[in-house]
Amino acid sequence: MLETSHPLNQPVSILKGAGKEAESSLASIGVFTVGDLMEFVPARYEDMRLKSPEEAEHDEKVTIEGMIQTEPSVMYYGKKKSRLTFKLLSGPHLINVTFFNQPYLKKKAAVGETVTVTGKWDRHRLAISGQTMEKGEYARGTDFEAVYLLRNAIPLKQFRKLVKQAIDSFGGHIVETLPPHLLKQYRLMERKDAIRALHFPVSHKEMKQARRRFVYEEFFYFQLKMQALRKTIREQSGGIVQKYDLVKLKELIDSLPFELTNAQKKAVNEICADMKSPYRMNRLLQGDVGSGKTAVATLALYASVTAGFQGALMVPTEILAEQHAKSLHDMLEPFGITTALLTGTVKGKRRKALLGALEAGEIDILIGTHALIQDDVVFRNLGLVITDEQHRFGVNQRRVLRSKGENPDVLFMTATPIPRTLAITVFGEMDVSIINEMPAGRKAIETYWAKEEMLGRVLDFTEKELQKGRQAYVICPLIEESEKLDFQNALDVHTQLTEYFRGRFTVGLMHGRLSSDEKDAVMNSFSANELNVLVSTTVVEVGVNVPNATVMIIYDAERFGLSQLHQLRGRVGRGSEQSYCMLIADPKSETGKERMTAMTETNDGFVLSEKDLELRGPGDFFGRKQSGLPEFKMADMVHDYRALETAREDAKELINAPDFWSNEEYHHLREMLNDSGVFTGEKLD
Ligand code: ADP
Ligand code: MG
């Protein structure tokens, strides 16, 4: 952000005591410049406040002041080992002080002398194992000492000295980057003061103030980038105005066998407003499984067609593509809309004919898998792209997808309810519509948590459902037996259940190692109710719709995160019958128990997602690294979520302020945005 000639961009080697060796040690922990040194965030603070023995905890590091009562004596033992001991009167307490291997301290210590000793407190023996000793009464400059994670690169003391020197010599060059009106509004410390207070706080309060400023700063910078990116995407040249036919759209809505929920209506309105505007839509549609996202998507696609454009719906699996293709066809064919399905299995002549029809504009809506974004798939005039289950991709992947068309409007759908704090971070550059309401009359799935001993009863219960003509899923964490993990595996469970239900019900098997043809075959027979029970790994997680299935049994349920359990449970409860979910689990950990209990208590995906975030933390929430989650040095998305919300609103307002691009006050922020590549789309982190 600053030119190389700027004082803060000078190498650390210009500091006294930072020779070649220190320079390369510092480089190994990412500190190259004076500015880096200043911005190195302490891992924690040590409380150096004077304590009386009553206040100190056992094993805590404490600083105690007192008068030496007995002649200090040194005992030598072993090679170079020694022990210095004396008794210290602190208040009414006589304390045993020991220093290991610091015999020279004896010179500082004489009977009657007042000293301040810092060390580890032993509450039971009224003893302190000293680390440092100062002559005289307690007089330390700071109550809290910053401790850094230095990975043994450089001694802590030396590092502190360098930081101090950097601040003393160059602190005057630290520029303020947050807009003055925000500093004032939130009473934030100025950057210069905050840097000093970060490393050398004079009080607990000051330390917290410094932290508060940097938390806000981190969120604000991040959100400013996101909002700039949002603006760029929206205003990219050539965003299309889709003048859809409202009368026709209403006809389709009226033809539906149900009334849209309010949340669905709101989402449809938001999407249609985006499509009609000259801006490019870049919107996320979040809603629980079964909340009616596909219905909303279908309406949006239809609107686009009435405006004279083509639409595309991309989903992650072939099974899902086929299901969607069928339901869209059934809904839209009566309205004269031509839909088509394109997956990896459409090949040769059929594929060629389909692509020809697509390019000629004879196909209105194309549904499919990733096959949709291959180079040779050419639309005549693509207006709207909808992708399902995109939450796993980061900002950059989303960018690639958008670039496939000629500035079409883009809608992302996800059935994984994402806590708001994560949504506005991971999807910070997008607009968000939320369907937080289930269609009326939907029966809540009854969820039970059972230990393995109860399996017999679970199976009896399942049998009753099967007798009624219903179907059941049985989910296992593993495909086959593992030496390392003691969990149920699908192959064994399939064998056991086949035996158990022999002559009464049929049991199918599904897992990730089947070819996609085999998977389709199994799924189709389950859909057709030729298989009564389906034993599966989590491959069945995404989007599958078999309304006749009413039982979901999940083995070793403690193995799964809350979001995943909720996703799995969402496979049932899709028809009109009462559905059940049975979690077979014997969790050892408290969080495991909390997860099971949470599942039995609520069917609300957003509630569960908040709980999941609380139990797992933001890093693990998505269950994999490629989440697109940014890393903050100081801010914590969960604990500091209020600051995150505030920073987002402030950033949004600033980026749209008429004087943002001209006012000298925002010069540094503009430079930061330029450097971050949000305008060129090159990089973003
Ligand atoms: P999602 O894509 O969010 O999982 P769907 O759009 O597939 O949900 O809807 C699930 C089921 O609910 C479908 O059978 C659909 O026809 C039905 N449905 C959708 N919206 C409503 C509604 N407002 N009222 C009643 N049923 C609805
Ligand atoms: Mg538009």
Image (cartoon, grey):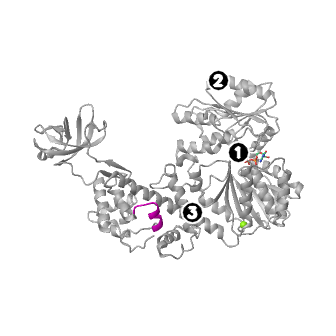
Q: Amino acid at mark 1?
A: Val
- Look at the image and tell me whether residue 369 can be seen: no
Q: On the image, numbered disc 2 is attached to which residue?
A: 454
Instruction: Say left or right for 609 vs 103.
Output: right
In this rendering, the label closer to the viewer, 1 or 2: 1
Identify the element where label 3 is drawn. helix
User: Residue at the location (27% across, 34% down)?
Assistant: 123
The answer to whether residue 394 shows anywhere in this view is yes
Q: Secondary structure at mark 2?
A: helix
The span from disc 3 to disc 1 (Cα, nearest Å) is: 28 Å
Residue 377 in percent (x, y) is at 76, 63
Which of the numbered marks, if any, corresponds to residue 289? 1
Residue lying at 25% horizontally and 37% vertically, measured from the top left: 53
Which residues fall within the magenta stretch?
179-189
| Amino acid type, residue under disc 2 in the picture | Met
Q: Which residue is mark 3?
A: 226
Q: Nearer the viewer, residue 514 or 61?
A: 61
Residue 481 placement, left or right of 494? left
**Real-space Cα distance between discs 1 and 2?**
29 Å
